[in-house]
């Protein structure tokens, strides 16, 4: 794991507030999109890419989650004007899209424990659309991203313990413990 040069978290745990870390999280889905487009279509014009994105979200259950999430990024929500699925909580169209994304296909990467990819996808989706989710939960999910990307999967007991810790600790203490920042910048 590496420290982000801008926010000093383990990459990309500074997302979504740190632009650099947020870019790394976006790249998780963007790399999936590029691989899919290259394999299926070669190169695409912007308008073709838009059409492919619409095709993908018509059948989200037939595509990997990274491809589906990236497809939503390419479409504009008619209701709130944000990228579809990433608008504020309460936007009906985005809430619906955010639910549909979870029917997408999830395949564990080689060499990582089963379930890692699921944890990664859930945490990526929360960090990329934190609206309506408690700051405590967003913090827990963003802080686990570097570990999940490394191929680590918490056991159920560890996950429960971490959640209990997040629920119990005072904010200041939790920030210094869980953020795992180096003492000086
Ligand atoms: Zn950062
Ligand atoms: Zn919306």
Image: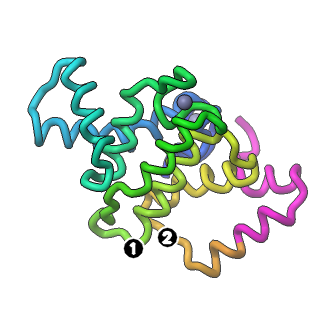
Q: Residue at x 71, y 50 (%)?
A: 179
Horizontal relation, residue 117 to residue 95: left or right? left
Horizontal relation, residue 65 to residue 93: left or right? left
Ligand 2 resides in the quarter of the picture at top right
Q: Residue at x 20, y 42 (%)?
A: 36
In the depicted structure, whether residue 115 falls above or below residue 175: below
x%, y% of residue 158?
64, 76
x%, y% of residue 121?
45, 55
In terms of sequence position, does the residue under pointer 1 or pointer 2 come before the other? 1
In the depicted structure, whether residue 132 falls above or below residue 22: below
Residue highlighted by disc 2: 153
* Residue 105 visible somewhere in the drawing: yes
The answer to which image quadrant residue 38 occupies is top left
180 part of magenta stretch: yes
Residue highlighted by disc 1: 113
How many numbered callouts? 2
Crowding at dot 2, Cα within 10 Å, few <14 / some 14-19 / many 20+, comes out as many
In the depicted structure, whether residue 17 falls above or below residue 82: below
Q: Secondary structure at mark 1?
A: loop
Q: Are marks 1 and 2 in contact (CB under 8 Å)?
A: yes
x%, y% of residue 16?
60, 36
Q: Residue at x 61, y 54 (%)?
A: 141
Q: What secondary structure is the stretch in magenta mostly built from?
A: helix
Crowding at dot 1, Cα within 10 Å, few <14 / some 14-19 / many 20+, comes out as some
Region rendered in magenta? 162-185
Q: Measure the alpha-carbon separation of dots 1 and 2.
A: 7 Å
Mark 2 CB within 8 Å of ligand 1: no
Q: Secondary structure at mark 2?
A: loop
x%, y% of residue 96?
51, 44
Horizontal relation, residue 168 to residue 153: left or right? right
């Amino acid at each position: 794991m590496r420290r982000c040069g801008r926010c000093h978290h383990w990459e990309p745990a500074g997302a979504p507030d740190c632009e650099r870390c947020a870019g790394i999280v976006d790249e998780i889905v963007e790399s999936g999109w590029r691989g899919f487009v290259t394999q299926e279509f070669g190169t695409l014009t912007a308008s073709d890419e838009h059409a492919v994105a619409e095709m993908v979200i018509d059948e989200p259950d037939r595509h990997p989650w990274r491809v589906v999430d990236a497809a939503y990024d390419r479409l504009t929500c008619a209701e709130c004007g944000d990228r579809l699925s990433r608008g504020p909580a309460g936007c009906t169209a985005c809430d619906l899209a955010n639910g549909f994304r979870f029917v997408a296909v999830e395949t564990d990467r080689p060499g990582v424990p089963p379930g890692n990819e699921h944890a990664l996808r859930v945490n990526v989706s929360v960090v990329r659309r934190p609206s309506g989710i408690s700051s405590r939960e967003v913090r827990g999910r963003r802080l686990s991203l570097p570990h999940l990307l490394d191929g680590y999967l918490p056991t159920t007991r560890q996950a429960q313990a971490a959640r209990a810790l997040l629920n119990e600790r005072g904010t200041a203490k939790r920030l210094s413990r869980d953020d795992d920042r180096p003492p000086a910048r």
